[in-house]
Image (cartoon, coloured by chain):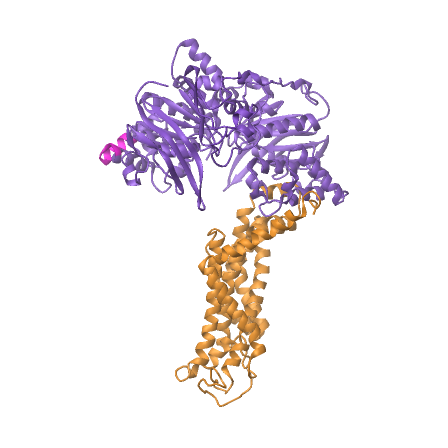
Amino acid sequence: MSGGTVLLSARGLSAGYRDGADTKQILADVDLDLPENRIIGLAGESGCGKSTLALAMAGYRPPGLRLLGGSVTFRGERIDGLSARQLRRYWGRHIAYLPQDTATALNPALRVGRQLAEVFQLHKGMNRRAALAAGTDMLRRVGLPDPERAMHRYPHEFSGGQQQRIAIAIALGPGPEVVILDEPTTGLDVTVQALVNALIVDLIRAERMTALYVSHNLALLAVLCDELRILYAGQVVEAGVAEQVYFAPGHPYTQDLVAAVPHHLDDRPVRGIRGTPPPAVVLDRCAFGPRCGFQAEACAVPVPLTPRPNGREVRCVRAGELALAQDRPVVPADRDAEPGTRAGGAGPAPLLAATGVGVTYTHAGRSMTALHDLSLSVGPGEVVGVVGESGSGKSTLLRALAGLLVPRAGTLAVNGAAVPWPVARRGQDTRREIQIVFQNPDASLNPRQSVGAIIDHPLRKFRPDLDAGHRRQRIGEVFEQLRLSPELLDRYPAALSGGQRQRVALARALVADPAVVLCDEITSALDVSVQASILELLGDLRRASGLAMIFVTHDLGVLRAVADRALVLESGHVREAGEVAQLLEAPRHEYTATLVRSIPDPAAHYADQHGTGQHGAGQHGAEQHGGGSDETRVPR
Amino acid sequence: MTAADVTPPELRVLEPTAPKKNAVRRFLAIPAGLAGSIGLLVILAISLIGPLVAPDNPTATVAAPALGPSAAHLLGTDELGRDVWSRLLSGGLSVIVLPLIAVSGALIIGCAAGLLSGYLGGWTDKIITRAVDVLLALPPFLLVLVIIAGFGTGESVIVIAVAAVYAPSITRVIRSATQVIRPREFVLVARARGDSLGWITLREIAPNIVPTLLVEIALRLTFAVMFIASLSFLGLGVQPPSPNWGVMVAENRDLLFAYPLPVLVPAAAIAVLAISVNLIADALTIFFGGGRPGQMR
């Protein structure tokens, strides 16, 4: 498909995890070539085998993993099945691996300099002094401020983005030929993500390295990579040039993945993918069939990866038969027709209004302002977004509104009546009217209570007038609205999927009929397809019941998908406020503009590239280096 | 519950019991859990059934003192001519019951103080923590001796004294376990809902610290068994002529070299009890994913 020597190659790779006496197969017959000087993107939902494949490409077998067939070769030499000792000849020197969580990748007990110098001593045969010099130089290249002093510091003294830069320096320092990156920027703030990704791609291009970049974010991969591979249930379902795969997906799964990610400049409604990936590979028919909108009888056979025009390969029997991409009706989001949406901001009395909120934390005698003179209001049926990065004060705001912390200044009114801040002094009605839903559904449901008990408690508390029968009826209604099966009522949270847990958390908030629901990043811990279905659900809820929300998020795409108006928060200050579409399309404040620029935008990227005739994705990031001071601002 | 007719009834019965049965089996699959459970069952059987089947009155002189084992007196007789076998069968109950009551008392105080201190924080936490520090700074025997000096000997005094010794360390463990759960989001949700202090601590937090609590109970019981047996040996606990393994060791220690059985058998029984409970504590730690290894104090 592409020229150049293939450095790292998997052929017919099959692997599975030991599951009792059986083996649960999670990779089936995967072919993956990494040709010289190319960046290959690997995408798919969680549980599709992305990380296992990435590790297997490095010859690594996690405990419990069995290779069932096929081979992995580096420059023609087989590296699968080698012992850890033999693999050390390749690791670091020829093949480098950069994991997602650098907090665990750096040794907290050793100074950065020692960890960095080690790789040069080991792989380049340098003496200690030369290795330290090379390390300092590498830290400079990854853009760490004051590299000499940084060498003497410990990992915890750096912010998340800086730690990731150090990990990059360690992985790329010895000049490996192949780099395997597994979601290297997931979990970082968006502006930091953009900077770190630009840095990674610049280094890879400058050193003419070959890379495999694993991510769930297709837009990001479309911008960074030359080619894309889409993995579903352990099989490659689509392979091709990144731009084509992203803009004209050939496999229904790829289409659904693209449609599931909300885009900040696009009003197209987000569409979830129903169901979840199968737990193991499916070989006798199309694995995506049960979730696919185009499933037909012809799909019930083993489907090969078939070449299509333009060097594309697609694993779908109907790929040639339908112009799948254009087939689906696209419903334009007609926001203005929705109830409660207000044009100017002047409308009916707000449900909730907070004025002049200021929050100061005191820690060890030092005080820090978390929020400064913030005002916001939510009308009936309105969704107000609050965007910002970590440390912006967005979660603090929700906690204050929920009555969990008392601001230093500011007033709160619900339905026009003043309400005290601390929850202990609020009336029962106010407590019912303001409900909060948190980011992490694993932590927000009590693992020792059944779903039924979790939902029943708020109802019992806020609606003492209802008897058991009416409560049951109300729970049934809410479950139906949230597309939850009543069977779940008897289960414990551990037996639920992530998406189900988050919907249970929503049900707990909705069951007692709140006026405003405070949502704290409620989709960011979820997989893209699950996130999309929650976003869809929230849209339906608004249309059906005029639900009002304050929606905190760091994801501008999600913001666009759910909110009417938004506030942009930075270090506790409101930088900009207004209609979401206007905010994102024509940002007025420099910080909003930086946020918007940090989102990978494949359309703009390729328009740029074709217009100026430039190649490589490095150029996309280069322009962002200017705004690079953001990272130093992140408080630790 | 509200789910009564939403789901078929079988489901409701299956859910809570099925994992429990499984849990017992998994617990017994741990060697320490199996050995400890067997040991504890044997001692419990002796202590509970023993008094009913004892051949002689444990406090009556039935033969010449210091006889060796014979068909009439399986383990011989002690210094005062009482049947050692009968005293052994009758002397277990107080060895088990007193620590159980003492630890239960310590547990009630420790859990209440620990939950409040861990959940409320602030001044409540400061006061409780300082009080715990002061109590922990006192050597346990000294504390008990002071209480006994003040209130006299007797089983109820012993129980109170031992509860006072263990309550502070239980408070500490429960407090730190509570502090781990407190920032979890389901607790925040309950707070934002305006739930009462009792609901949040007992219904939201407490069920999540049960693993810690079980390990703590087993560990404290081990210590309490040894502690009360030692006190009985010193003559501060259960008073002669009551049959009690600790008392038996004390009474017959002069005969140790001539007739070792009256000392060794009750001593061994105490050891088996203490070791079994300790093994169970270890097994519980492993069972709950090595949560927190029991700190010795």
Of residue A633 and residue B103, the one placed in the foreground of this image is B103
Nearer the observer, A477 or B277: A477
**Residue B257 visible here:** yes
Q: What residue occupies the far right of the structure in this picture?
A: A465
Residue A305, image x, y percentages = 44, 24
Q: Which chain is purple?
A: A
Front-most of B177 and B70? Answer: B70
Is residue A127 shown in magenta?
yes
Which color was chain B given?
Answer: orange
Figure quadrant of residue A110: top left
Q: Position of residue A490 (x, y in %)?
A: 63, 45
B205 to A181, vertically: above or below: below
Is residue A547 magenta-colored? no
Q: Residue furthest bottom?
A: B64
In the figure, is residue A134 to the left or right of B140? left
Instruction: Say which residue appears at 37% left-offset and 28% top-offset.
Output: A144
User: Does residue B2 sit above or below A99 in this rendering?
Assistant: below
Q: How many marks?
A: 0
**Residue at (46, 58) in percent of width and height:** B282
B264 sits to left or right of A269: left
| Percent position of residue B165, x then y | 52, 64
Residue depicted at 43% across the width and 10% down the height: A610
Which image quarter: residue A176?
top left
Q: Is residue A139 left or right of residue B119?
A: left
